[in-house]
């Protein structure tokens, strides 16, 4: 296996030198802080209704204004970050784990295992993902956990294909042949030799996947079948924003910006990782 | 039968229990049209914005507001409510009620034709009656017709019904749309007949086309028996989002819709808007409530229900959800109508009183949550998805209840599943829902202890022998004073028992493009005289020959 210290630090150095990727990483870090310490960023309670202060524009006491029930928008955006990040990570975690499993099996064993698994992947890819999610949610109770699981279960096919392709090439390499010659079993070869070498493309796919998952969650919540009110999520704050957009711009702008910036951050970071891990770009 | 997810397009008086948040009431018009030669002229088209699509045109077998409103253009009943909510003849020219109150003789209009040219006769009425009591007809409105002991059609223009005993809602029940026998005879289940999709009626408009999820189009029926309507075409567009519909209204894509309170208060007060639109405001015939499943161990105790009524801040609900455009509900009748009892027990917002009542009932506070027998006071309230007002109501109630140590979780469910899986199967702790209020005060189906079966309307399981007796009394006499006494007492008992916490009666807020003239608000709302609405020739927008 490769991935020695020198290549690792080389990777980090190249990643950090990419300004866009570093900016993306900083944004993500910021939102992590936000969701870890929401109290620091907002003194208001996100679900505290205040009938007297409905739809107040941004002011000193409510820096991002209030919504149609007088709740503080800043507090809701801050607590909403938790939901979005949680959904992003858990969903992508599920998708990546599944994709890895299927991809490794398929690529390593080949033959009929590969044929069956890849046809299944093709089949899953035939469904328009969003409609698949909508129909699944129609049967389940809409909740944040169900959303995560459903997004995860409908998003693993890309990872599986990536991993399979990598595995196909890696298993023919000399070091794998050497391991085989020494009598290593299939499990050892897969986990010690193949898996670590597929991690770079997976990391890229996962980072970009988080962005996609956050967007999907926002869309579902916007449509009212995602995170259920009064729990704030960027998507469902936007729903209230849409109904009041003509006179309460702050209700649409801030959660919208939060989604935009976070997704952009993940995309920049993902691209940065891809470039940094690409050996053809080494030394640039 | 139950109110629907699809909000009413236009506030009109429903004869049957259904629908959500709109209805007729006292006029309080705002704005007037610009001065133009106000001469009625034939022509032009009106485009309605509708939140929900039609599910079918035969009102016997549909229960949602969109369908009933669309069907109203094509079909007629024997009777209908006039602008003052009095019953008047529609297909019936007149009627007599026998002195003992048990027999009604309808004299039908002569010369009325179905839109396909066939004559309308008492055979059609008889056919409609038979289908209403036929178990193969999937109708929610059969109960009233089952009270009929004998029906007869002695000649083509006379129809006689006899009841076993005086039945007060009898006359109003004949507002049911009369069905064309010659077109429906061969279908045992009328909901599966082609007529449910392509109706043929006797009404002021003829059906032209229905594009599912998009629009329904009607064209004027030139030989309508009450005179040819002025507006040549009615197009009902399905726009499932109120904000989008409002944008369409302003850009001219929609002529008439129902405003939301925020739209009424914040978006329609500009001089520019008032120049092109007339908006109206009157008390809706409906109310929103928090209903308890009374067999639930928490809610079996009257004191708990009363405590929740005291905890609920109705004023905050009206201010926060309706922006002040509504009033407190104290019972299931519309404020200001004859059956409404203004003197019942009220539950002002009083958290201290609520806590005391809960303490009486054995609930002790522990870490901010009430506990009894080791069980925390925690329940889930269900409401239908897509109804913004109800979602807000739930959020405010959740906060009100948290103040007295009760934890309420909120769950919203898609309408069909909400009714079929939860309401009909009684799988809920509490619900936020709404009823429309029919002009006749008979609410036997909602409150009688015999109506608690699956799919029946007493979904909370309310059973009170005195209310049972009074409901029976109220519907078996025509004596207004006796009826009033019965319904007044029912309201007193309901106020004491709080099977529902009656929350609010909203205002109906229709808006109409002001090229339409002849609109005269009345207790019944604005659409009762739709066939008299017109567009002056100078303002005509669409060239449509009537």
Image (tube, rainbow, N blue to C red):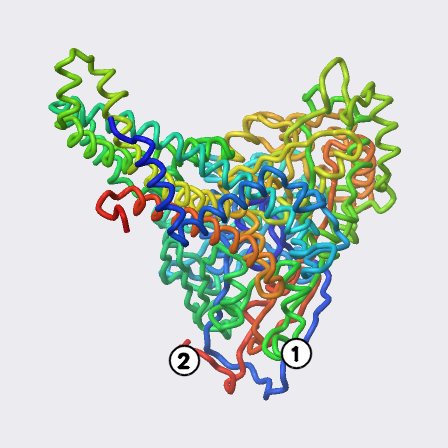
**Side of B98 where A36 appears, left or right:** left
Residue B271 shows which numbered tag?
1
Residue at (74, 37) in percent of width and height = B501
Identify the residue position indicated by label 2 in the image. Answer: B543
Describe the element under mark 2 as helix, strand or loop. Answer: loop
Q: A113 or B300, which lies in front?
A: A113
Q: Where residue A204 sits: x, y (%)?
A: 33, 41
Q: B482 or B471, which lies in front?
A: B471
**Residue reaching furthest to the front:** A6
Q: B336 or A115, which lies in front?
A: A115
Chain under disc 2: B
Quarter of the figure with residue A115: top left
Quarter holding the N terminus of chain A?
A: top left
**Side of B235 where A5 appears, left or right:** left
Chain under disc 1: B
Specify which label sits upstream in the sequence, 1 or 2. 1
Residue at (57, 59) in percent of width and height = B10
Q: Where residue B381 sits: x, y (%)?
A: 64, 33
Q: Where residue B463 sits: x, y (%)?
A: 72, 25
Residue at (68, 50) in percent of width and height = A72
Q: Of the residues tagged 1 and 2, which is closer to the observer?
A: 1
Q: A64 or B177, which lies in front?
A: A64
- Residue B364 in view: yes
Question: Mark 2 Cα within 10 Å, few/some/many (few <14, many 20+)?
Answer: few
Question: Mark 1 Cα within 10 Å, few/some/many (few <14, many 20+)?
Answer: few
- Residue B196 in view: no
Residue B52 shows which numbered tag?
none
């Amino acid at each position: 296996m490769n991935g020695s210290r020198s290549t690792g630090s080389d990777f980090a150095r190249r990643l950090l030198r990419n300004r866009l990727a570093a900016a993306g990483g900083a944004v993500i870090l910021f939102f992590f802080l936000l969701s870890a310490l929401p109290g620091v960023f907002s003194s208001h309670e996100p679900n505290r209704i205040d009938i007297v202060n409905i739809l107040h524009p941004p002011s000193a006491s409510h820096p991002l204004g209030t919504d149609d029930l007088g709740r503080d928008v800043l507090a809701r955006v801050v607590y909403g970050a938790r939901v979005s990040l949680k959904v992003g990570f858990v969903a992508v975690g599920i998708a990546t784990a599944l994709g890895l499993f299927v991809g490794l099996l398929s690529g390593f064993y080949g033959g009929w295992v590969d044929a069956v698994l890849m046809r299944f992947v093709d089949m899953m890819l035939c469904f328009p993902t969003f409609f698949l999610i909508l129909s699944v949610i129609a049967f389940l109770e809409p909740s944040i956990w169900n959303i995560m699981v459903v997004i995860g279960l409908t998003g693993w096919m890309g990872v599986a294909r990536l991993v399979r392709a990598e595995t196909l090439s890696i298993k023919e390499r000399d070091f794998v042949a050497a391991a085989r010659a020494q009598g290593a079993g299939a499990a050892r070869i897969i986990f010690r030799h193949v898996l670590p070498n597929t991690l770079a493309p997976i990391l890229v796919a996962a980072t970009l996947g988080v962005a996609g998952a956050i967007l999907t969650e926002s869309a579902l919540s916007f449509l009212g079948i995602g995170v259920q009110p009064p729990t704030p999520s960027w998507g469902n704050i936007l729903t209230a924003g849409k109904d009041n957009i003509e006179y309460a711009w702050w209700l649409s702008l801030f959660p919208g910006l939060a989604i935009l910036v976070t997704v952009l951050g993940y995309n920049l970071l993902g691209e940065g990782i891809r470039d940094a891990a690409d050996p053809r770009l080494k030394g640039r | 039968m139950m109110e629907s997810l699809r909000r009413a397009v236009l506030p009109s008086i429903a004869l049957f229990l259904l629908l959500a948040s709109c209805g007729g009431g006292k006029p309080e018009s705002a704005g007037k049209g610009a001065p133009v030669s106000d001469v009625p002229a034939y022509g032009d088209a009106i485009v309605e914005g509708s939140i929900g699509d039609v599910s079918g045109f035969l009102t016997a077998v549909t229960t949602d507001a969109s369908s009933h409103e669309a069907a109203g253009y094509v079909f007629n009943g024997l009777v209908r409510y006039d602008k003052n909510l009095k019953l008047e003849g529609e297909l019936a020219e007149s009627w007599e009620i026998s002195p003992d109150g048990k027999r009604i003789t309808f004299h039908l209009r002569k010369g009325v034709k179905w839109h396909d040219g066939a004559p309308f006769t008492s055979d059609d009425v008889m056919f409609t009656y038979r289908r209403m009591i036929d178990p193969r007809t999937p109708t929610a409105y059969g109960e009233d017709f089952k009270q009929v002991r004998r029906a007869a059609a002695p000649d083509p223009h006379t129809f006689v019904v006899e009841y076993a005993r005086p039945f007060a809602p009898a006359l109003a029940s004949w507002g049911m749309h009369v069905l064309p026998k010659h077109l429906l005879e061969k279908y045992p289940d009328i909901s599966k007949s082609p007529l449910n999709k392509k109706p043929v009626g006797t009404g002021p408009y003829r059906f032209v086309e229905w594009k599912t999820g998009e629009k329904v189009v009607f064209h004027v029926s030139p030989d309508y028996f009450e005179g040819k309507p002025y507006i040549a075409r009615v197009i009902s567009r399905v726009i499932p989002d109120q904000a989008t519909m409002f944008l369409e209204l302003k850009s001219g894509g929609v002529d008439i819709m129902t405003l939301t309170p925020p739209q009424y208060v914040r978006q329609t007060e500009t001089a520019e808007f008032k120049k092109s639109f007339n908006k109206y405001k009157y008390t809706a015939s409906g109310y929103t409530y928090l209903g308890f499943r009374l067999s639930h161990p928490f809610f079996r105790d009257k004191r708990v229900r009363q405590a929740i009524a005291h905890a609920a801040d109705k004023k905050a609900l009206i201010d926060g959800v309706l922006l002040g455009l509504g009033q407190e509900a104290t019972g299931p009748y519309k404020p200001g109508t004859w059956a409404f009892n203004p003197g019942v027990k009220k539950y002002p917002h009083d958290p201290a009183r609520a806590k005391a009542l809960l303490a009486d009932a054995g609930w002790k506070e522990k870490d901010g949550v009430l506990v009894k027998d080791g069980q925390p006071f925690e329940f889930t309230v269900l409401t239908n998805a897509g109804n913004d007002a109800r979602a807000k109501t739930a959020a405010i109630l959740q906060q009100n209840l948290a103040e007295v140590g009760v934890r309420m979780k909120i769950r919203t469910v898609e309408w069909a599943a909400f009714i079929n899986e939860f309401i009909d199967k009684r799988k809920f702790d509490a619900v936020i829902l709404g009823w429309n209020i029919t002009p006749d005060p008979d609410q036997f189906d909602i409150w009688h202890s015999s109506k608690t079966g699956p799919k029946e309307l007493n979904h909370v399981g309310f059973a009170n022998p005195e209310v049972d007796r009074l409901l029976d009394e109220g519907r078996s006499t025509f004596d207004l004073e006796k009826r009033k006494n019965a319904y007044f007492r029912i309201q007193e008992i309901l106020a004491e028992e709080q099977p529902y916490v009656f929350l609010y009666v909203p205002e109906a807020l229709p808006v109409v493009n002001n090229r339409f003239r002849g609109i005269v608000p009345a207790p019944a709302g604005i659409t009762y005289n739709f066939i008299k609405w017109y567009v002056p020739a100078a303002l005509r927008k669409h060239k449509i020959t009537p």
